[in-house]
Image (cartoon, coloured by chain):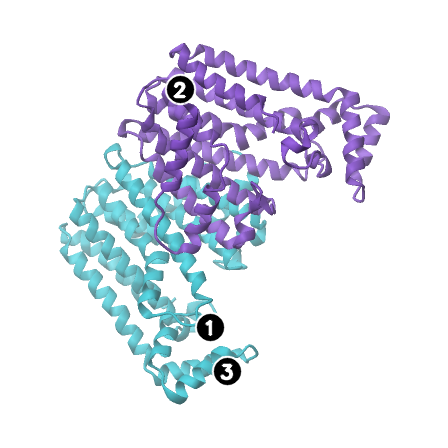
Chain colours: A purple, B cyan
Amino acid sequence: MNLKETLQEINTQIDRLAYRPEPIELYEPIRYLMNLGGKRMRPLLTVLGAYLFTDDWRKAIFPAIGVEVFHNFTLMHDDIMDNAPLRRGKATVHEKWNENIAILSGDVMLVQAYELMLAVEDKHLRSIIQKFNICAAEVCEGQQLDMNFENYPTVSEQTYIEMIRRKTAVLLGFSLELGGIIGGADEKNAHLLKEFGQNIGIGFQLKDDLLDVYGAAEKFGKQVGGDIIANKKTFLLISALEKAKGNTLNLLNEWLAKTNFDKIEKVKVITDIYNQLNIKQLTEDKINQYFELAFQQLDQIVAETSRKQVLGDFIQMLRERES
Amino acid sequence: MNLKETLQEINTQIDRLAYRPEPIELYEPIRYLMNLGGKRMRPLLTVLGAYLFTDDWRKAIFPAIGVEVFHNFTLMHDDIMDNAPLRRGKATVHEKWNENIAILSGDVMLVQAYELMLAVEDKHLRSIIQKFNICAAEVCEGQQLDMNFENYPTVSEQTYIEMIRRKTAVLLGFSLELGGIIGGADEKNAHLLKEFGQNIGIGFQLKDDLLDVYGAAEKFGKQVGGDIIANKKTFLLISALEKAKGNTLNLLNEWLAKTNFDKIEKVKVITDIYNQLNIKQLTEDKINQYFELAFQQLDQIVAETSRKQVLGDFIQMLRERES
């Protein structure tokens, strides 16, 4: 299996996806969003999950694209809720068209994701739809928790991890488990794949939190400190609020309470506090902890070592990205 | 089968529906909307469809509730798009909570509808999910077409019927077909049930259009002429625009173009035009045409006459309602 060729194959099939003919107001936004690109990490994970257990991993491609369509459905609806103007550097669907179209096109995408799941064999169909249902509900719950947190004065580390598990990690877990089941994994191996996926998912999200503050602006492709400016309750802020004492805590709370401030100054002050409290190291340790746990689970999966290596290398590549 | 008892059974099971425990922001609105009541026409159709072919019609109850959950999902999202303040006389979800919650709770409802569909036997699962997918996509398309029509200067009768077919009628068709398949109908009978459901669905919508103008206000429970005031392109207006000539057409267009007007006067003038053009009779004829076609299809279904009678009587009862 050649990863680059597989990615091309996935992209080709995404380009060829048949949409119903009309109304175009409903289907043009779907094609637009699906063709904005992205790393296609989720469908690649599904295919790699299948490849662990079978040479016939191509039979995982349409369900894999179902996961990608589902992911883009969540982006379309989340962007409305978050008032986001841009997605992958282009106008979001609700900005380019309007909110109603973004709601309704998103709804159709969720239906289309179920349609693509039907490409699995009969013997797996019920189990896969069941797992997909739980995954889909948890992703929605994660988004709701994320919105709730905006109005909470504080959030515990545990609560935060549970939010990102649902919002981000369960879909990576499902992507891999789906591939595993299609490839013929038994229940135990499929479960390990799911756990592996969830743990790397949490690791990736914590890495995102870290890069927002400590990433190189030119590589990261967005403003460094965006989360700081918005008071977003990331792992870094939550940890800082837990560790800070006395004057440091006062200074932190003072800056969090400011409504008028110089953005660059705020990022500098809060980053200084993070540095003082050793938050970077703390976050890196937490990230390593999740990846170590994940790789222990990968080790336990009964499959050819060389195939596990392909999956492991792909994860390492993503992990080492600086953007 | 006793219809009243069956309705109670459906309502009891809806009350007992298990929702995931949290976040409550996501699940409370679902429970709220599902418990606002309604005629439960769709789940009753599913159960009646099953009863045509089996005594064990209770096995259709959970998929039937899946249809009801799907229907309420469309109401939750449509109410956002239509800026509707009230649903069944109570605040809509986006009014009582907010728009984001209505988007996300609706998404979860769509997932829950698929979960309830899983209550069908393995041998029917793939076919039912496939049919449900098409139905769900068509319902979304119908809503989009309805929104598009607001900006069109005119709409042909044929285009209008196709819109209401997708927005309203296909779900009644699916409700019945679903029940039929669960009950053991062969392909031909299942197809006839679907066609029957779609035709009564179109008939019901045209009846709604008629009642908006010619229904008794106290029975109809909403303002008579609401569609007229809003220039809604109903079957009546479309027919009037096709039939009107000369001064009548000028008067009609003049009133459609007014932005400042007395509502009662507008309803009176347009109703007078409808009367002059015999639109009431024309609409009634069209309604009868769809119901006659539907009942011919019911006749063709191979099932016990007494059981077809129960379904036919239920439809007649709904048809004769004045509200």
**Circle 3 — which element?**
helix
Q: Is residue A72 in sight in this rendering?
A: yes
Q: What residue type is labelled 2?
A: Ala
Q: Is residue A213 above or below residue A110?
A: above
Q: How many labels does the image show?
A: 3
Q: In this view, does A56 lie to the left or right of B187?
A: right
**Circle 1 — which element?**
loop
The chain ID associated with circle 3 is B
* Quadrant for the N terminus of chain A in the image: top left
- The residue depicted at 57 percent of the width and 18 percent of the height is A290
Q: Is residue A258 left or right of residue A63?
A: right
The chain ID associated with circle 2 is A
**Mark 3 and mark 2, same subunit?**
no
Picture quadrant where residue A227 is located: top right
Residue at mark 3 to residue at mark 2: CA–CA distance: 68 Å
Picture quadrant where residue A206 is located: top right
- Circle 2 crowding by C-alpha within 10 Å: few under 14, some 14–19, many from 20: many
**Location of mark 1 (residue):** B231
Residue at mark 1 to residue at mark 3: CA–CA distance: 14 Å
Q: Which amino acid does label 3 sit on?
A: Glu
**Mark 2 and mark 1, same subunit?**
no
Between residues A293 and A39, which one lies in front from this camera angle? A39
**Location of mark 2 (residue):** A190
- The residue depicted at 42 percent of the width and 61 percent of the height is B146
- Residue ranking furthest to the bottom: B247
**Location of mark 3 (residue):** B265
